[in-house]
Image: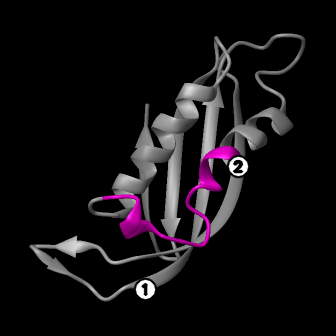
Amino acid sequence: MKSRVVECFKFEAAHAVIIDGQTEEIHGHTFRLEVAVEGPLRNGYVIDFLQLRAIVEEVIKKLDHRNLNALFENPTTENIALWIAEEVEKRLPEGVKLHHLRLWEGDENGVEFEF
């Protein structure tokens, strides 16, 4: 049996993605993030919801209301999602691993990574 905990988040940020060597106009999004972690049940839970929420919020506060071009060479949704995943993984307690991460750029465009 696999057990997962899922938490959802939102943050606001602006970016101008470089596509085929051309930088698009800077624009903003409400990014929606879903993070799922898995691990063994210990004392009836995988990780406390509040602990996972604190971990992810510590990471995304670095992105919230920022120009992502100041943080990433090319702030595609994929690059942002991979960075979030790396930062979250560093902070997870032993025995808990990142299962998947979904990052939505607005309501209609998103990326998903499974680990």
Mark 1, other Cα within 10 Å: few <14 / some 14–19 / many ≥20:
few
- In which quarter of the view is residue 78 placed? bottom left
Q: Is residue 41 above or below residue 59?
A: above
- Magenta residues, as a range? 58-72
Residue at 58%, 55% (x, y): give it: 62
Kindly give the residue lying farthest to the right in the view shown. 43
Kindly give the residue lying farthest to the front in the view shown. 70
The percent position of residue 13, horizontal first and vertical second, equals: 54, 73
Q: Quadrant of the C terminus?
A: top left
The percent position of residue 24, horizontal first and vertical second, equals: 26, 84
Kindly give the residue lying farthest to the bottom in the view shown. 25
Q: Quadrant of the N terminus?
A: top right
Q: Is residue 6 above or below residue 98?
A: below
Q: Which residue is mark 2?
A: 57
Q: Nearer the viewer, residue 32 or 88?
A: 88
The percent position of residue 112, horizontal first and vertical second, equals: 43, 51
The percent position of residue 49, horizontal first and vertical second, equals: 82, 37
Cα gap from disc 2 to disc 1, whole angstroms: 23 Å
Check residue 63 for magenta coloring.
yes
Mark 2, other Cα within 10 Å: few <14 / some 14–19 / many ≥20:
some
Under mark 1, the amino acid is His
Display coloring: one colour
Under mark 2, the amino acid is Glu
- In which quarter of the view is residue 72 placed? bottom left
Given contact means CB atoms under 8 Å apart, are the residues at marks 2 and 1 in contact?
Answer: no
Q: Which residue is mark 1?
A: 27
Identify the element where label 2 is drawn. Answer: helix
Q: Is residue 2 left or right of residue 43?
A: left
- In which quarter of the view is residue 37 placed? top right
